[in-house]
Amino acid sequence: MVAQAGSSGLHATLLNERSRLLRFLAARGAGHEAEDVLHDLWQKIASAPERPVADPISYLFRAAENHMRDIRRATSSREKRQFDWQAMGDAPEDTPAGERVLVAREQLQQVQSALAALGSRVDHIFRRYRLDGVGQADIASELGISLSSVEKDLQKAYRMLAELRTKLNTE
């Protein structure tokens, strides 16, 4: 018998094999989240284009195994990315608190000086937008300038901050 991947064939097979699939997923690491994983699997299968499936039970179990493998890979990748991100920063115990405070104050002073060097309008717009949370349109009307001018001034400030960040990271 060849089942269609549409609503009738695989859907009926999934409903008939639901408890076995849940046990299968739980045994392969889904644990208490087996129900959610099965739901995700079904959404993935249901959104796939319809095509004939010679052995729907095997197809569903193979799809479940592949889905669990994808979840493990994504989890592993996410954990590695988070570990690498945390390893990039200074650990609080590595740098004395006083030194971190002094470095932060020095960097803040460099940012303030660099913003001031861009001009009072750019400095004002950046502070109103980023620190005060005022919208760009409101800033434009406050200063009597176009929204485009506000956007360009913010871009100048962002470019300067990116350059300063690069400079500080190389020091």
Image (cartoon, rainbow, N blue to C red):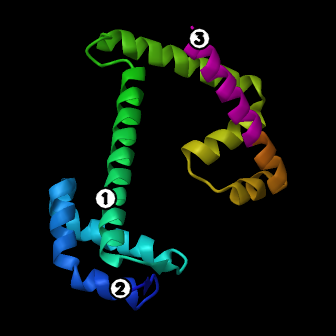
Query: Where is 85 relative to 6, above or below?
Result: above
**Residue under numbered circle 3:** 170
Could you tell me if residue 169 is visible in this image?
A: yes
Q: What kind of residue is marked 3?
A: Thr
Q: Secondary structure at mark 3?
A: helix
Q: Secondary structure at mark 2?
A: helix
The image quadrant of residue 127 is top right
- Depth check, mark 2 against mark 3: the one in front is 2
**Residue under numbered circle 1:** 65
Dot 1 alpha-carbon crowd within 10 angstroms: few under 14, some 14 to 19, many 20 or more: some
Question: Which residue is situated farthest in the front direction here?
Answer: 1
Q: Earlier in the sequence, mark 1 or mark 2?
A: 2
Q: Residue at x 39, y 47 (%)?
A: 74
Q: Main secondary structure of the magenta part?
A: helix
Q: Residue at x 55, y 43 (%)?
A: 131
**Residues drawn in magenta:** 154-171
Left or right, 164 with reference to 19 = right
State the CA–CA distance, disc 2 to disc 3.
57 Å
Q: Residue at x 37, y 33 (%)?
A: 80
